[in-house]
Image (spheres, rainbow, N blue to C red):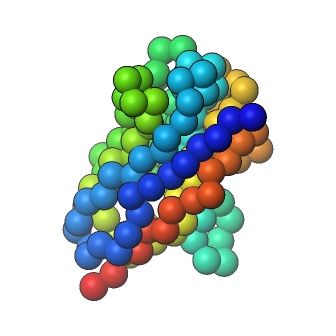
Amino acid sequence: QVQLVESGGRWVQPGGSLRLSCAASEFALNNYGIGWFRQAPGKEREGVSCMASDDGATLVARRLKGRFTMSRDNTNHTVYLQMNNLEPGDTAIYYCAASTRVAPGLTPDEYDYWGQGTQVTVSS
């Protein structure tokens, strides 16, 4: 069983920045592809970014490129999502997920384990 714990979500004004964290086990980071997803009220869950377990290569959703960056800290077994220049449209619950695939994509069905989510609210 893979356990994922997200943190870092809060209220922020437009133009602000946040860094979300996803704590996982060392085994998870070395053997599972990791993804970040978000779901706004009344909308479907959408992929934000993902990372391959072997080489750490990342993919960011096209419309979020330039603002969102995914990284990992192997020492702390944590994956991060850095979000800059936030917009009200970024308001959502953000989820971390793990896939048995080495290099999953941005489709929720590719993932097998999910965290509980962390709320991000962007408003003035």
- Residue 81's x, y, as percent? 40, 46
- Residue 95's x, y, as percent? 57, 54
Q: Residue furthest bottom?
A: 124
Image vertical order of residue 86 relative to residue 22, above or below: below
- Residue 63's x, y, as percent? 44, 52
- Residue 113's x, y, as percent? 71, 42
Q: Quadrant of residue 46?
A: bottom right
| Identity of the residue drawn at 70% across and 24% down | 101
41 lies left or right of 119: right
Image vertical order of residue 94 relative to residue 100, above or below: below
Total marks drawn? 0
| Identity of the residue drawn at 54% across and 36% down | 24
Q: Is residue 79 visible?
A: yes
Q: Residue furthest top?
A: 54
Q: Is residue 110 visible?
A: no
Image vertical order of residue 114 relative to residue 94, above or below: above
**If the image is split into quadrants, where does the C terminus sit?**
bottom left
Compare residues 113 and 39 and report the one nearer the observer: 113
| Identity of the residue drawn at 48% across and 15% down | 55
92 lies left or right of 107: left
**If the image is split into quadrants, where does the N terminus sit?**
top right
Compare residues 9 and 48 and report the one nearer the observer: 9
